[in-house]
Image (spheres, rainbow, N blue to C red):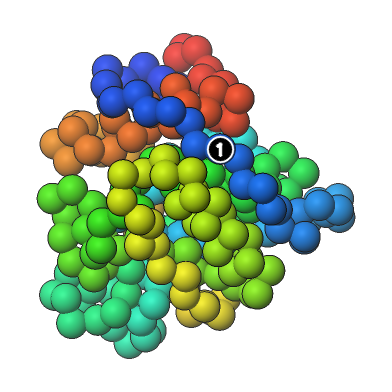
């Protein structure tokens, strides 16, 4: 059964919010992509299970990997990260087709589906690993993310200022999480955390970004 079929049939409810405006500035590399090339975005917005479930639905996203960013390779494991002794964030590496989705549009989804105004926490998930962060791979990505944050703050669409950090990251400094964390939502639909936290976010992205999600398939 397709991932989108499982999500589309889940009985979930989430609060409906106004869709965030599209970024006014886009990534230069996305404007004239070469046929067949893929680009990468790395973001953190709380538990990586939720972010993984969200971005797997987006058209043009070809791969999502849950992992750790912002710390060292030696301590890039779930036990160490949860001990609050490392500087990692639970992050997702999003590989995408720039002919179908842009970096700016991915940021639009990202900022719409988590709270970027709370420092080191998302709801009841509290700790440095749950911080809101954009890990930029070059100055162009930094510029787009920085401009979008300023744009959103200027609109006052959030009641409080955005505290999302912009952190430089080398491509090889993203460390994939353990295998059991990958595609976690689709593989653990009965998990209480998934049912009450992740699935409402998955449903919300389907409601707010109908033009950007992969159409749900009919379950055989």
Position of residue 219 in the picture relative to residue 189 (left or right): right
Q: Position of residue 56 (x, y in %)?
A: 49, 41
Residue 119 position (above or below residue 7) = below
> For the N terminus, which image quadrant?
top left
Q: Residue at x 29, y 30 (%)?
A: 200
Q: Position of residue 174 (x, y in %)?
A: 47, 73
Is residue 50 at least partly visible in the picture?
A: no
Residue 12, percent across and down? 27, 22
User: Is residue 146 found left or right of 6 in the rendered image?
Assistant: right
Q: Is residue 209 visible?
A: yes
Q: In front here: 63 or 99?
A: 99
Residue 144 located left or right of residue 115: right
Position above or below: 136 against 123: below
Q: Nearer the viewer, residue 74 or 46?
A: 46
210, above or below 150, in the image: above
Kindly identify the residue that appears in the image at 28 percent across and 38 percent down: 198
Image point 67% across, 42% down: which residue? 101
User: Mark 1 = which residue?
Assistant: 21
| Residue 115, position as x, y percentages in the image | 32, 48
- Number of marks in picture: 1
Q: Secondary structure at mark 1?
A: loop
């Amino acid at each position: 059964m397709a991932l989108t079929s499982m999500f589309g049939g889940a009985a979930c409810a989430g609060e409906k919010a106004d869709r965030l405006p599209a970024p006014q500035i886009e990534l230069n590399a996305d404007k004239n992509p070469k046929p067949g090339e893929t680009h990468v975005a790395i973001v953190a917005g709380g538990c990586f299970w939720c972010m993984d479930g969200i971005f797997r639905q987006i058209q043009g996203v070809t791969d999502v990997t849950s992992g750790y960013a912002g710390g060292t390779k030696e301590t890039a494991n779930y036990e160490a990260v949860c001990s609050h002794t490392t500087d990692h964030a639970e992050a997702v590496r999003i590989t995408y087709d720039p002919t179908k989705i842009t970096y700016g549009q991915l940021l639009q989804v990202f900022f719409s589906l988590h709270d970027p105004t709370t420092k080191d926490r998302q709801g009841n998930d509290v700790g440095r690993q749950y911080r809101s962060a954009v890990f930029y791979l070059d100055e162009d990505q930094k510029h787009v993310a920085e401009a979008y944050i300023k744009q959103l703050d200027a609109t006052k669409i959030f009641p409080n200022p955005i505290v999302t950090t912009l952190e430089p990251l080398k491509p090889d400094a993203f460390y994939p999480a353990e295998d059991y964390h990958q595609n976690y939502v689709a593989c653990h639909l009965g998990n209480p955390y998934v049912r009450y936290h992740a699935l409402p976010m998955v449903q919300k992205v389907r409601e707010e970004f109908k033009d950007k999600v992969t159409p749900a398939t009919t379950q055989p």
